[in-house]
Amino acid sequence: MADFSDFISQTVPVLHGHVAADLVFWSQDELLRWLDDRVKHLATKGAFVVRNTVALVNGTASYDQPDRTLSVIHVAHNHKPLKASSSNELEALTPTFDTTTGDALERWYADNTSISFQPVPNAVAVAAASTAEVITHEYPATVDGVEAVDIPVPLVVLDMFAVEVIAEAYRREGDSQLPEAAQQLDKLAGLYQSAVEQLWGSR
């Protein structure tokens, strides 16, 4: 597991500083913002899979998802996988789908902020299993240097992020611009990206 200090120790010497405060053309905040962009980009590729649980409440259909949720991959209740559906599909089947309760959950549906179950769990469903298992893709916590934030990647992936950020630094217009160096670093980053895709696979 890496953190932002590992990243800073990799990038700052390449940008001609001993510590971040030595940097002339860039700031630590700038480097961390670019790093956070790269982490979020990797998250959209399905790299960060998180197992969560939802505490079910008798008579309650919808529950908040974690703030950084990108998508829901799998949902199960009482060791039984639930079928993914949409509210439109469920409304066509049962107009009262969002209020009708049942002993066993069968389907789930989600929007940007919540996940819901059909039928709505009743006391029997909650007694059978008080939580539903939910596996999601999520963004990691924002890397801003204010708090010690772990970056949930192996160090080799942090190496890729460092190369990408250094390329971004040299690509930026100004006295520090080195477009040829940025192009070469982009090629190296491409090799890393191919390896990372092999590491995580497509999801």
Image: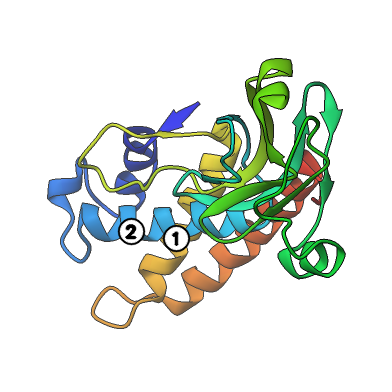
**Residue, x 66% and y 45% (percent of image)?**
47
**Residue, x 63% and y 24% (percent of image)?**
131
* Residue contact at pointers 1 and 2, CB within 8 angstroms: yes
**Residue, x 80% and y 57% (percent of image)?**
85
In this view, the residue in front, 100 or 176, is 100
For this view, does 147 lie left or right of residue 197? left
Q: Which mark is residue 33?
A: 2
Q: 132 above or below 108?
A: above
Residue 139 rendering spot, x and y as whole percentages: 51, 49
Q: Is disc 1 placed on a helix, strand or loop? A: helix
For this view, does 152 lie left or right of residue 23? right
In this view, the residue in front, 48 or 170, is 48
Residue 180 rendering spot, x and y as whole percentages: 50, 76
For this view, does 16 lie left or right of residue 187? left
Q: Callout 2: 10 Å neighbours few (<14), some, many (20+)?
A: some
Q: 177 above or below 123?
A: below
Q: Is disc 2 placed on a helix, strand or loop? A: helix
Q: 71 above or below 54?
A: below
Q: Which mark is residue 37?
A: 1
Residue 49 rendering spot, x and y as whole percentages: 65, 38
Q: Which mark is residue 175?
A: none
Residue 59 image-quadrant placement? top right
Q: Work out how far the residue at label 1 is from the one at label 2, CA to CA, in angstroms.
A: 6 Å
Residue 145 image-quadrant placement? top left
Q: 184 above or below 114?
A: below
